[in-house]
Image (cartoon, helix red, strand yellow):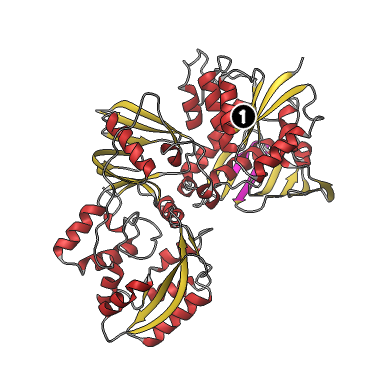
Amino acid sequence: MSVPLVIGIYGSGPRAEACAQTVELSPALTAGIRVEATSADGLHDAIRRGRANAWAVALGPRESSQAVHVLVDTSTRAVILGTPRSPLGDALGSAHPAPTDPQIVLTPHVRIAHGWVMLRGCSALFGRGHINGELALRGLADGHPADRIDLVAEAVAVALGLIPGARFVEVNGTGDRFVLRADGGELRVTVTEGEPRLTASLEVDGQAIEWLATETEETLGGRRYRTHPFVERALAQLLAPTTAPGAGDGIAELLEVQALVEEIRHAAPALATPGLGALAAAPAVAGPLGALGLISPKGTTGGAGPPELTPPTIESLELVAFRAGVKPVLFLTVPPEEEATIRSRLGEDVHIERHLRRVARDARDRWTDDRQSGEPAVELFVSHDPGLAKKTAALQLADPTRHAEEIGDLLGYPRCCVEAFAAQTGRADNSYDRLQVAARTERRDRWPWELNDLAFKVVPFYPCRYDCPAALDLARGVLGALDSDLRARVETFLARSVLYFHDGEQLWLDGQADRQTVRFTALEARGPGARSLGACLAETQADALQLEAFSLIGTAASREVLSLRRTDPGLGFIAPFA
């Protein structure tokens, strides 16, 4: 009798089509098994209806966690208790009464495929003994856009196969290089975004082995092999005997991977921010809260949302800073219809270099820098020294990334902030830029309100951290040039905490906060998702919210009144400017 197997195909477009086609055309891999290929939502529905009485399958690090949550909520055959060090384990354990045995009690009916693990090299190297060396993974095995936490999860899954029982030793500040160690050896691991590629230089029982794999080819010990497509590898991993090298993980192995990832994430705050691919991905959940990666709780209707966020309307603070002598060169991009007004405010004793361009921005404050897309704009380079204005314009038009430090000096930006910005993997997404600054800010108590740039900027650059002393000195210099009433208006607006998802979705809160919790008395919102979240908080009479790894909790008088599951924990952070 055939055994039902439901395979969830996540995403859309060519990736999902290729996955579905591979499932349909792989009878050798699925012999004796009735395969039902579904969308992500379809997989969850199938589990809830009990159609998958053998295995549930999820392809991808984050989606596998989501599918496990659904299994715990719906399957009487799954009893799961997570380890204390794993937030995923804690979330899973809270879904059912804890069994008497304090260890993990798991169902054998769930298998999870990690994209790189079914390579020929994994089968050859897993279980070999003492392994030391370098392991580098670029991109997810299926080429799908990923954030760094996804990449770390894939790398950890491979590393645990090479050196079982590995423990976390150290990680660099950006989270893209870390060390794992076990009795069987040590691996120095690097992860980066880009086209899929695995590279390893290993010493296995004293023998040097080079291992390279791409989407089409794998080289191991000097021999070259054709690489099977990702979905075929994933299916083979899921259908292999559980004891086979490179077999798909059960939930116990998933929790082991997640626990190590969580340790690395806590040690490297930059991992809390998503990569460019994650920011660009469409939300996986429907409705306004779905845009924030949140699932609405049952019984919450969401009434009228909080007032619309309204930044103060005042003269450009860049103009204020230039006139106050804080900046040697002023660089402005303005609509053509505002150029005359800006020029009239600059005075007579300045030199202006003028260039026409086009700027394309979307609702999330991402922009296209091809100078051909979007609305027309005018670039103005202004200085009391004509040579400085001309030099800044020439550098900006030539290659602003290559000349970032020199341009930053001319514009009066702190060198530490310029270097941090230039080191990012992307700089054309202002929401992503702010997430990067927050990830570099290790301070957990109140951040200086003068550097709150989430909806209104005092300084025109991104600080290296939201508590950078050099950036703070410049911000206070600009604010010192304002009259007392105007400065008070700016402080009233900025000295608040913000639950920030991206430029188009923000919840501003009056009250006290740290990096995880905000106690508030009033709210303002930007974006339909933030308004919907504010409405849920108001309906439940919550006076505090807590942002956890896999949930957003609302409390009233310290009692939980609202719990929303986070389907994409990489998105969103609390900025405690209050």
Quarter of the figure that contains the N terminus? top right
* 199 w.r.t. 181: above or below: below
Task: Provide the residue span drawn in magenta.
Answer: 180-191
Q: Is residue 512 left or right of residue 85?
A: left
Query: Does the stretch in magenta take in 190?
Result: yes
Residue at point 65%, 17% (across, down): 53
**Percent position of residue 473, x then y:** 29, 65
Mark 1, residue position: 253
* Rendering quarter of residue 11: top right
- Residue extending farthest right: 223
**Res 325 seen here:** no
> In terms of depth relative to the viewer, which is nearer, 375 or 531?
375
How many marks do you count on the picture?
1
Q: Label 1: state its secondary structure.
A: helix
Q: Position of residue 384 (x, y in %)?
A: 32, 84
Chief secondary structure of the magenta span?
strand
Q: Check disc 1 and give the amino acid type.
A: Glu
> Residue, x 60% and y 28% (percent of image)?
43
